[in-house]
Image (tube, grey):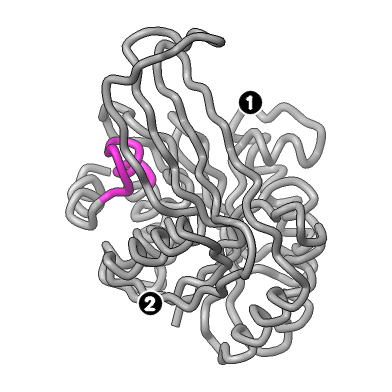
Amino acid sequence: MIYTVTFNPAIDYIVRMNRALDPGMTNRSVSENCFFGGKGINVSTILKNLGIDSTALGFVAGFTGDAIVKSVREKGIIDDFIRLGDGISRINVKIKSTEETEINAQGPHITQEAFEELLGKLDGLKKDDILILAGSIPGSLPDDVYEVILERFKDRGIIFVVDATGDLLKNVLKYGPFLIKPNNYELGEMFGKTLDTDAKIEEYARKLQELGAVNVLVSMAGDGAMLVTEEGSVYRAGVPNGIVKNSVGAGDSMVAGFIAGYLETKDYRYALKMGTAAGSATAFSDDLATGELIRSIYETL
């Protein structure tokens, strides 16, 4: 079974305007949408769209938390969220006009007792289960939460996938995660370098392997993606033609597509193409991509 953890799920409230935001004045939108998710939930959604079940874990609170859980269930995803007693799950406001403005909320306070409850749920994972940890850590939890989780379960044969940045990612490499997915800018920032060639990206991806990562998938936006595998192979994927409508969830979709492709074939080249197709399909969609669109884009790569 695959398990995803979203520490701070959110409702993204998308407001579109036909003119620039005018601070201090009444502004009127031309359309609005709500999208329910968070990085781990996004991964679970794409997996489901590709026919693969997973269990979504995390923390929710208040009426917004109820709406997030309802949305997850409507997608057919198994959920096992922990309900917090106080606060509400986040509503992030994203204003799209001539420029994009985002207001990301803080989210509810996660108590130590609630975190211990999450660890108790994860205690049920078995050998060869996949645990996907994605995204930042809420301010109410210590910065070493990912380390605490991987340390606790490191000897159980669980397959770890970590999609995080900076020290949050670097500090868990010693536990040998099966897959990590920095983008090329995040990879450069980890080493204080500007990575402007494939050769440099490969060089520093291998440095992450030296620190413990098994496979390193580097997303490169419009330049595609690079995979450096545990076998030492390097695979490169471009991006298909299409109109980019949405950047939210594209990286999560790439992770989900890669895992789906790898589980299907155990072939890294295929997994990279499926991950690239999934990331591109979401970028070309208003919401997370459908399985049909992902597979049709895969055929063009």
Residue 132, picture quadrant: bottom right
The mark closer to the camera, 2 or 1, is 2
Q: Residue at x 52, y 72 (%)?
A: 57
Give x and y (percent) for residue 18: 32, 11
Instruction: Measure the C-alpha gap from mark 2 to mark 1.
Output: 41 Å
Secondary-structure class at tag 2: strand
Q: For residue 78, which numbered disc appears in the image?
A: 2
Point out residue 180 in the picture as x, y percentages from the top left corner. Answer: 61, 57
- Residue 229: quarter of image: bottom right
Location of residue 120 by image quarter: bottom right
Give amino acid for label 2.
Ile
**Vertical placement of 115 versus 156: above or below?**
above
Q: Is residue 285 magenta?
A: yes
Residue position marked by numbered label 1 in the rendering: 196
Judge whether residue 167 is colored magenta: no
Residue 89 x, y percent position in the rendering: 54, 55
The quadrant of the picture occupied by the N terminus is bottom left
- Residue range of the region highlighted in magenta in the rendering: 279-289
Q: Residues within 10 Å of mark 2 (few under 14, many from 20)?
A: some
**Image x and y of residue 6, in percent:** 56, 62
Question: Secondary structure under badge 1?
Answer: loop
Relative placement, left or right, of 117 versus 40 is right
292 or 12: nearer the viewer: 12
Which image quarter holds the C terminus?
top left
Between 256 and 241, the one lying in front of the other is: 256
The residue located at (82%, 61%) in the rendering is: 142
